[in-house]
Amino acid sequence: MSRSVIATGLLILAVTALSACTGAPEPDTRRLVLVSRAAGSGADNLAFPGEVRGRNEVALSFRVPGKIAKRNVDAGARVKAGEILARLDDSDLVLQSQASTASLQALKADRDLAAAELKRYAELVGPQLVSKSLYESKKAQAEAAQSRYQQAAAQAQVNNNQAGYAEIRAPAAGVISQRLAEAGQVVAAGQTVFQFAQDGPRDIAITVAERHLAELSMGQPVAVELWTEPGVRYTGKIREIAAAADPMTRTYAVRVALDEAGALTQLGQSARVLVSNRTNGTLSIPM
């Protein structure tokens, strides 16, 4: 038997003996832990989409019902103060005005006749050529005729005014932002025909969810970015916050006033309002 075989056998015996003397391995008591880096709870800015709106906006309508006979402007038109925007068919209103004027003339004649008779009876009651009771009767008739005339005069003025209400005129220089009626359409009194934006400062109209309302306050400075000028930010401030939420969307309407009026190009332009996130300094940790 060679020496190498003997040596190998002795090595195997030694290893076997060593294994017999060694006990069972101890269980691993280490625990696995998920590690996450603490981060800010929000972004640097809250972004709200919005659109450019006029600071002074008004819904224009007729003050009397009727059929639109003519429409002179369309959406996007620039108008001057006092310019006629639309007109109703005022034939019925003109007839009412004429009828009230004719009635007023008749009552004026009755009033003048009663006043003249009262003057004659006043001259006769002194020398007792007529009884005092007859004089008092003529006086009452004259006063009643005067009252009827005043009532008819007021009604005639109302009818004349209604004839003038058959026109919509621009209250100031500005832009027609929306048209909601067409010639030939019958509209009710007060029904919106045009949306009008007066020339002057512009606002950015946005809507804010209830959970972000605490981030906003009146007069708070914000940044405004127009979609046509990406990366260019203009300064503004919060001018108005709605006191109640919209019943349908459950959001609050907010108006942001731009400091740079020259930044605006047209009404309805898309914009984005950036508000500093006040809670960004806190750290959030996974549960």
Image (cartoon, rainbow, N blue to C red):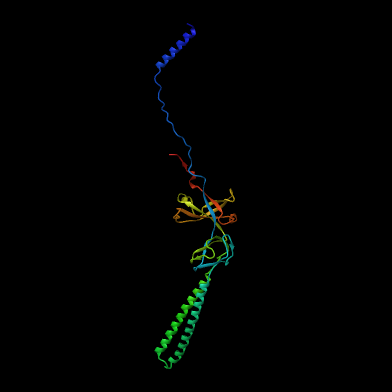
Q: Is residue 147 above or below residue 217?
A: below
As rendered, which of 63 and 12 lies closer to the eye? 63
Q: How many marks?
A: 0
Q: Is residue 63 above or below residue 34?
A: below
- Where is residue 94? Give x, y as percent: 52, 74
Where, quadrant-wise, is the C terminus in this rendering?
top left
As rendered, which of 89 and 202 lies closer to the eye? 89
Q: Residue at x 49, y 7 (%)?
A: 3
Residue 228 vs residue 159: left or right?
right
Q: Is residue 98 above or below residue 228?
A: below
- Where is residue 142? Give x, y as percent: 45, 84
Q: Which residue appears farthest toward the top when viewing the image?
A: 1
Q: Residue at x 47, y 11 (%)?
A: 8
As rendered, which of 198 and 217 lies closer to the eye? 198
Q: Is residue 218 above or below residue 157?
A: above
- Where is residue 268? Give x, y as percent: 55, 55
- Where is residue 179? Give x, y as percent: 54, 61
Q: Residue at x 49, y 82 (%)?
A: 106
